[in-house]
Image (cartoon, grey):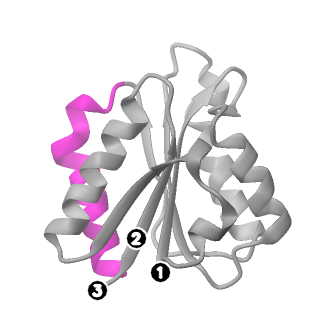
Amino acid sequence: MANVLIIFGSTGGNTELVCDKVSEVLTQNKHSAAIKRAEQTTITDLESFDVLIFASSTYGQGLLQDYIEPLYFEIKKTGLKGKKCTVIGLGDNKYNVEYVVEAAKILENMVKDAGGELVVPPLRINKTPVTVLNTSVNDWAQNLSNAI
């Protein structure tokens, strides 16, 4: 079974809520899943895990959440060569329809550009995640569990 690190940037708690659910599903499927706040994560923290999940909400005009941004730039410099990864992005089109869930696209491009392997397509959530935790979030996490 895989050793998974879920790294998230969250301000209001919704991204953390989704990450908790993903961790729960992975653990139920016999994977080891650790969750770490982006602002407490260093590049060296990523090395000992088989799979990395990057999660962020979308802010402003399609920006990453502030706490994950420094790690994003470090990864762009150091790379993720051969590392299995996936992405979770949250957004809300009440702020800007053009950039809704843009964090998923930014993180997906980061993984690809850094040489990481995207093992499943990103999980994209528009609006509150509370109503989809036991449906689409659960299903995505099950799919990820099967892929790793």
Q: Is residue 6 magenta?
A: no
| Residue 50: mark in rendering | 1
Q: Earlier in the sequence, mark 1 or mark 3?
A: 3
Q: Amino acid at mark 1?
A: Asp
First reached walking from the N terminus: tag 1 or tag 2: 2
Q: CA distance from mark 1 to mark 2?
A: 6 Å
* Residue type at numbered disc 3: Met
Q: Residue at x 36, y 48 (%)?
A: 19
- Judged left or right of residue 77, residue 41 is left
Where does residue 57 sit, x and y in percent of width and height?
53, 34
Q: Which structural element holds mark 3?
A: loop
Q: Which residues are magenta?
A: 128-148
Marks 1,2: beta carbons within 8 A? yes
Q: Quadrant of the N terminus?
A: bottom left
In-front residue for pair 73/146: 73
Mark 1 vs mark 3, CA separation in Å: 9 Å
Q: Residue at x 51, y 67 (%)?
A: 52
**SS state under label 1:** loop
Please rate how many residues cluster around mark 1, counting C-alpha atoms within 10 Å: few if below 14, some from 14 to 19, many from 20. some
Other residues around mark 2 within 10 Å, as few (<14) / some (14–19) / many (≥20):
many
Q: Which mark is residue 4?
A: 2
Query: For residue 81, what is the image quadrant?
Result: bottom right
Say which residue label 3 marks.
Answer: 1
Residue 25's x, y, as percent?
Answer: 20, 61
Q: Is residue 74 above or below residue 16?
A: below
Q: How many marks?
A: 3
